[in-house]
Image: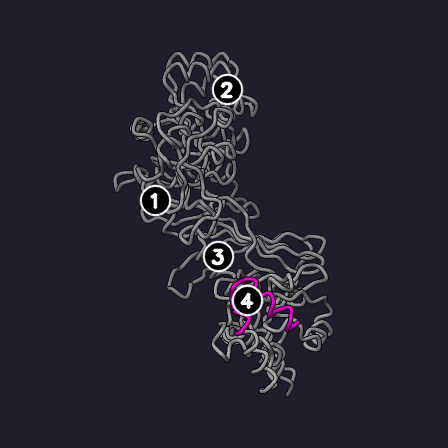
């Protein structure tokens, strides 16, 4: 090895032949290793040595200062073992675990680790100083493992240590999710481990794996926090809890459990009060659409509908709209499932079907509360729609949501649910279809001239200036994603007398859509073009959401 390493150092211009001879002489005199001798003589530093070893042995090279060690891997190797062999477990996959080491040829150490974990060992090279520092710095997880290992004096002590360890993992999941700006946290069982994924800007990504041995305890921890029955694992449950981060940020988390083949799956929706109070003007409306929406929502009576798929920001738009139109002279009352954000000056009701608090029953009760403005979380069935229409006809402004692909398709959906076309034409004041698209990271986005073939995929005319795409490598500002934050994409339909005639005649989506475009409605697609031309998003992103 030494001869080969020496030759490699010479061929790569790290050392001269004379320096290699000096190293060999020093090594034999001091009974040290060749690499250590290079460092002692000042010919190489640790990083240079590891780079050359990685080249010689064809092993991966790891910079631990910029590497996120997987917590579930730390669970597999206790701190004493890691310290004694100066290694750091990085991640595991199937029957193999990757270990950071500065001594890849230390067969005894690798065999010990293999027996301890019952896994094959894949070495990765890192400097000895980085490894030592990492063993001490990752105290959040190693500390708890030390406590568990040493807590052999009694069952109570051991139980307390294990609980502390699980609490630390749960808190770390929540802290990391908040720091990343996640909207949802998914805790998912597999046969061999527990996977933690988050949804950031609408896209799922994995943040952590947890050892299977800790899976049940971690699920129970979140169920306890949400005041859910931990003994019940055979049926779905819902709960809620409040979490305060280490930085003092307070959020609500809505928790849902679902029995699966390997254990209960948990999904936690993060409800950040600060995000629920976004002013309407900050949502992404064009100037003309913003003015038209304000005017429609300022009317005393009628139905205002916000449509789009799940997760398209409908609730945020409704809350922003209510904030705009609600004042001390108006009585605003809602029925929601669930109440995502709480607002002063608005009476908010929570759906509770077991107690008889359905949308229909709540809407009937709301009409007896002398409201000016009613917000119904979702128009789910004919009875709810009929009551909403009746409320609009009797002098109330009704706001609600519906799941449709675009504004024009809303009418056919309402027809299919049994709504009277004449009454819809009489009461509907505005329909807003929307999507959420990711914003390009302004720190690392890349300017380029798109090919015609790329433009054709979204039927976009050739722009007059270069546009932007994401940087594949990303940057620190966007955590390597290339995107940061989201913006609303809106299609606003304001029914005209001519369009209402088509509605009364129960015309098709295409005919209603054609009339709306003729009257000046800008489609979701055209609004997307505006965002692309302004450098807000990319062709790739618009294609994804449409």
- In magenta, the rendered stretch is 1-19
Which of the two discs, 4 and 3, labels the residue nearer the N terminus? 4
Task: Identify the residue at horizontal 45%, vertical 54% (top origin).
Answer: 180
Task: Identify the residue at horizontal 50%, vertical 28% (top origin).
Answer: 454
Which of the two discs, 1 and 2, labels the residue nearer the N terminus? 1
Spatial CA distance of label 4 from label 2 is: 54 Å
The percent position of residue 44, horizontal first and vertical second, equals 50, 72
The circle on residue 177 is: 3
- Within 10 Å of the Cα at label 2, are there few (<14), some (14-19), or many (20+) other Cα atoms? some
For discs 2 and 3, the disc positioned in front in the rendered view:
3
Q: Nearer the viewer, residue 513 or 254?
A: 513
Tell me if label 4 and label 3 are in contact, CB under 8 Å: no
The answer, for residue 331, to whether it is visible in the render is no
Q: Nearer the viewer, residue 507 or 16?
A: 16
Q: Nearer the viewer, residue 475 or 340?
A: 475
For discs 1 and 3, the disc positioned in front in the rendered view:
3
Local SS, label 2 = loop
Magenta segment: does it hold 11? yes
What residue is disc 4 on? Answer: 169
For discs 1 and 2, the disc positioned in front in the rendered view:
1
Which of the two discs, 4 and 1, labels the residue nearer the N terminus? 4
Tell me if label 4 and label 2 are in contact, CB under 8 Å: no
The answer to which quarter of the image holds residue 210 is bottom right
């Amino acid at each position: 090895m030494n001869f080969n390493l020496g030759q490699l150092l010479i061929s790569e211009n790290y050392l001269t032949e004379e320096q290699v001879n000096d190293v060999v002489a020093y090594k034999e005199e001091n009974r040290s290793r060749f690499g250590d001798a290079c460092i002692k003589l000042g010919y190489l530093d640790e990083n240079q040595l590891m780079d050359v070893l990685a080249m010689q042995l064809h092993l991966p090279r790891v910079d631990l200062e910029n590497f996120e060690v997987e917590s579930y891997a730390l669970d597999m190797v206790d701190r004493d073992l890691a310290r004694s062999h100066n290694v750091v477990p990085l991640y595991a996959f199937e029957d193999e675990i990757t270990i950071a080491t500065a001594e890849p040829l230390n067969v005894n150490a690798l065999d010990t680790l293999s027996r301890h974990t019952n896994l094959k060992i894949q070495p990765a090279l890192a400097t000895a100083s980085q490894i030592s520092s990492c063993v001490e710095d990752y105290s959040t997880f190693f500390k708890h493992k030390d406590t568990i290992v040493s807590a052999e004096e009694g069952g109570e002590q051991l139980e307390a240590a294990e609980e502390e360890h699980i609490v630390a993992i749960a808190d770390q999941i929540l802290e990391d999710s908040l720091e990343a700006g996640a909207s949802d946290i998914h805790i998912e069982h597999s046969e061999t481990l527990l996977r933690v994924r988050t949804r950031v800007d609408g896209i799922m990504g994995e943040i952590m794996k947890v050892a299977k041995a800790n899976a049940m305890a971690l699920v129970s921890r979140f169920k306890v926090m949400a005041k859910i029955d931990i003994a019940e694992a055979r049926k779905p449950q819902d709960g809620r809890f409040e979490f305060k981060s280490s930085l003092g940020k307070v959020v609500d988390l809505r928790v849902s459990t679902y029995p699966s083949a390997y254990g209960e799956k948990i999904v936690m929706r993060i409800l950040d009060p600060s995000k629920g109070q976004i002013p309407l003007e900050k949502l992404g409306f064009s100037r003309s659409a913003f003015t038209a929406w304000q005017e429609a929502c300022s009317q005393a009576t009628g139905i205002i509908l916000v449509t789009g798929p799940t997760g398209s920001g409908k609730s945020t738009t409704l809350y922003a709209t209510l904030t705009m139109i609600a004042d001390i002279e108006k009585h605003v009352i809602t029925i929601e499932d669930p109440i995502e954000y709480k607002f002063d000056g608005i009476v908010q009701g929570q759906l509770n079907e077991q107690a008889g608090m359905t949308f229909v029953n709540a809407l009937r009760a709301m009409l007896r509360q002398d409201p000016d403005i009613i917000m119904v979380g979702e128009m789910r069935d004919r009875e709810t729609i009929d009551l909403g229409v009746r409320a609009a006809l009797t002098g109330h402004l009704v706001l609600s949501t519906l799941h449709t692909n675009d504004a024009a398709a809303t009418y056919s959906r309402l027809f299919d649910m049994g709504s009277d076309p004449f009454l819809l034409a009489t009461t509907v004041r505005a329909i807003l279809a929307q999507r959420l698209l990711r914003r390009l990271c302004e720190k690392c986005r890349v300017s380029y001239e798109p090919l015609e073939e790329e433009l054709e995929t979204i039927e976009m005319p050739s722009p007059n200036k270069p546009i932007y795409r994401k940087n594949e490598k990303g940057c620190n500002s966007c955590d390597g994603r290339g995107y940061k934050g989201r913006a609303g994409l809106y299609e606003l339909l304001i029914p005209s007398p001519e369009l209402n005639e088509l509605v009364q005649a129960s015309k098709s989506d295409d005919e209603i859509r054609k009339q709306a475009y003729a009257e000046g409605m800008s489609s979701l697609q055209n609004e997307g073009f505006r965002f692309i031309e302004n450098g807000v998003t990319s062709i790739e992103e618009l294609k994804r959401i449409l």
